[in-house]
Image (spheres, helix red, strand yellow):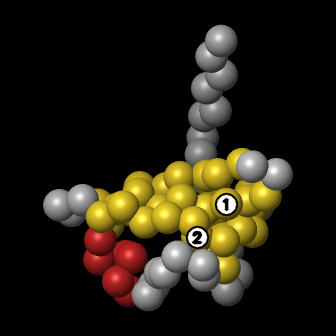
């Protein structure tokens, strides 16, 4: 799969919490760090996502906010 987004982080799916219309997918990217994505339940099904699968967290954002 080729994408124009350059921020691609490899990891493994460590959890999927399905809601009414969207799911929260946790991707363990190592060193105790987890990235969580909110995607549609349909996308979870189309991609056949399962805990333990390898996955990419692809980040495409125009803004990054920092707080303290």
Q: Which mark is residue 9?
A: none
Q: Earlier in the sequence, mark 2 or mark 1?
A: 2
User: Front-most of 63 and 25?
Assistant: 25
- Evaluate whether residue 58 shows in this view: no
- State the CA–CA distance, disc 2 to disc 1: 6 Å
Instruction: Say how many tags the image has.
Output: 2
Query: In screen coordinates, is 30 left or right of 67?
Result: right
Residue plotted at (60% across, 40% down)? 62
Residue at which label 2 appears? 13
* Quadrant of residue 4 within the rendered picture: bottom right
Q: Is residue 35 above or below residue 12?
A: above
Residue plotted at (58% across, 70% down)? 13
Residue 51 location, x and y as percent? 52, 76
Asked whether the beta carbons under mark 2 and mark 1 sit within 8 Å of each other, the answer is yes
Query: In screen coordinates, is 45 left or right of 35?
Result: left
* Quadrant of residue 3 within the rendered picture: bottom right
Q: Residue furthest right?
A: 31
Quarter of the figure that contains the C terminus: top right
Does dot 1 land on a helix, a strand or a loop?
Answer: strand
Does dot 2 land on a helix, a strand or a loop?
Answer: strand
Residue at which label 1 appears? 28
User: Front-most of 41 and 34?
Assistant: 34
Q: Specify few, some or many for label 2: CA neighbours under 10 Å numbering under 14, 14-19, or 20 or more.
A: many
Q: Specify few, some or many for label 1: CA neighbours under 10 Å numbering under 14, 14-19, or 20 or more.
A: many
Q: Is residue 22 above or below residue 62?
A: below
Residue 53 location, x and y as percent? 60, 81
User: Front-most of 50 and 56?
Assistant: 50
Quarter of the figure that contains the N terminus: bottom right
Residue plotted at (62% across, 16% down)? 67
Residue 30 location, x and y as percent? 79, 58
């Amino acid at each position: 799969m080729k994408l124009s987004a350059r921020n691609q982080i490899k990891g493994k799916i460590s959890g999927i919490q399905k809601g009414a219309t969207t799911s929260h997918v946790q991707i363990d990217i190592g060193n105790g760090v987890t990235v969580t994505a909110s995607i549609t339940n349909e996308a979870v099904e189309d991609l056949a996502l399962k805990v333990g699968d390898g996955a990419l967290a692809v980040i495409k954002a125009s803004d990054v906010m920092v707080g303290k």
